[in-house]
Image (tube, rainbow, N blue to C red):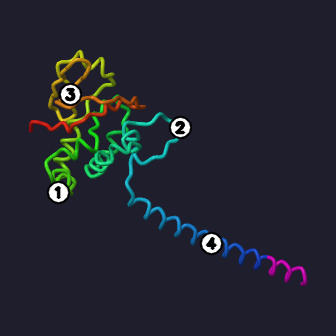
Amino acid sequence: MKTTIKIVCLFSLILLVGCKDSEKQASDSTSTEATTTTTNTEKQGQAFLKDDEAKPTVLDIAIGSPDHTTLVAAVQAAELENVLVNTGPLMVFAPTNAAFDALPEGTVEDLLKPENKDRLAYILKHHVTPGNYAKDFIKKFPSLGQASNENIVVEVKGEDVYVGGAKILASVPAGNGIVHVVDAVILPKN
């Protein structure tokens, strides 16, 4: 009889501990689901993955440049981050903050409004060309086809190279292409 009571007590204890673990697992599961739900509202895509080992993408280079904060704000407003981390290769003609400041007053602020997202995206795509060409190689082309489906004229003036009227100031290689820093915003014809 004592053995039966001990077995019943032991079984009850195991059952009680098991129930407590089940409650904890259910609580942890609910907590995980709530966290997952919260996480899913954040921006998603390849641009938002952290990678400390790969060579910086054209987007990483722009984000890391204090001279391109307006460009980065425009890319974010147009939700083009994931495009700029694609495999590429991509040539991005990156206007400086000063280039954006040279636009007529209120232009940038107007383009950054949510209702102008498509227009802004079109203008930014006009700054992207498939390929990975150094400035000296770009000199050989009369024009470049942009992601906007429009072409921009390439001009050589002495040692300077201009694309769509913007002078290439510097070039920075990226893991998925190259960033050519330019001194003007290249506006599409359409």
Dot placed on the residue nearer the N-terminal end, 3 or 1: 1
Near-viewer residue (111 or 41): 111
Residue mark closest to the camera, 4 vs 1: 1
The residue segment tinted magenta is 1-10
Q: Amino acid at mark 2?
A: Glu
**Alpha-carbon span between mark 3 and mark 2:** 32 Å
Tell me which residue sits at (89%, 79%) in the image: 3
Q: Position of residue 75 (x, y in %)?
A: 29, 46
Q: Say the numbered circle drawn on residue 24.
A: 4
Dot placed on the residue nearer the N-terminal end, 4 or 1: 4
| Residue at numbered disc 1 | 115
Q: Say the numbered circle drawn on residue 163.
A: 3
Tell me which residue sits at (20%, 55%) in the image: 109
Q: Say the numbered circle drawn on residue 53.
A: 2
Question: In the image, is 130 to the left or to the right of 11?
Answer: left
Q: Position of residue 132 (x, y in %)?
A: 33, 25
Numbered disc 3: secondary structure: strand
